[in-house]
């Protein structure tokens, strides 16, 4: 039985039956999504995820206090703004190669 025939068959059912089918179908779909989410968050993850988690934990440890991190960011921002307005970086090319197009 194809899906279109099944939908047409459901349209002939009384409204309370259609509501029950919709409720149980959505509950089953929600359960499947929940099981996939649960499998992704438990110990069934790969070692790549474990190494990524370790890398994030290492970066957090090296970041220092939030105030230090914020001061460094603000200092870097002011340095970047100063370079944009007062000391633009120039790009120089030592050689140019021209090749014919296809």
Image (spheres, grey):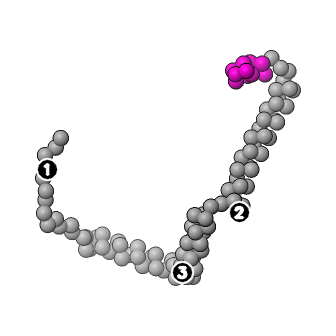
Q: CA distance from mark 2 to mark 3?
A: 26 Å
Which residue lies under the disc numbered 2?
43
Quadrant of residue 32 within the rendered picture: top right
Q: Is residue 90 above or below residue 61?
A: above
Circle 2 sits in a helix, a strand or a loop, which is it?
Answer: loop
Residue 20 visible in this rendered orientation of the protein: yes
Of residues 99 and 45, the one drawn nearer to the viewer in this rendering: 45
Q: Which residues are magenta?
A: 1-11
Which residue lies under the disc numbered 1?
99
Of residues 98 and 76, the one drawn nearer to the viewer in this rendering: 98
Q: Residue at x 71, y 63 (%)?
A: 43
At label 1, counting other C-alpha atoms closer than 10 Å, the crowd grade (few under 14, some 14-19, many 20 or more) is: few
User: Which quadrant of the figure contains the C terminus?
Assistant: top left
Q: Is residue 17 magenta?
A: no
Circle 3 sits in a helix, a strand or a loop, which is it?
Answer: helix
Q: CA distance from mark 1 to mark 2?
A: 55 Å
At label 3, counting other C-alpha atoms closer than 10 Å, the crowd grade (few under 14, some 14-19, many 20 or more) is: few
Q: Position of residue 57 (x, y in %)?
A: 59, 74
Q: CA distance from mark 3 to mark 1?
A: 48 Å
Quadrant of residue 76 within the rendered picture: bottom left
């Amino acid at each position: 039985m194809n899906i279109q025939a099944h939908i047409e068959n459901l349209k002939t059912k009384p409204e309370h039956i259609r509501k029950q089918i919709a409720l149980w179908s959505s509950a089953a779909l929600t359960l499947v999504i929940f099981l996939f989410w649960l499998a992704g968050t438990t110990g069934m993850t790969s070692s790549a995820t474990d190494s990524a988690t370790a890398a994030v934990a290492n970066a957090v440890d090296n970041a220092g206090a939030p105030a230090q991190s914020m001061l460094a960011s603000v200092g870097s921002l002011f340095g970047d703004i100063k370079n944009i307005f007062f000391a633009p970086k120039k790009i120089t090319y030592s050689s140019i190669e021209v090749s014919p197009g296809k």
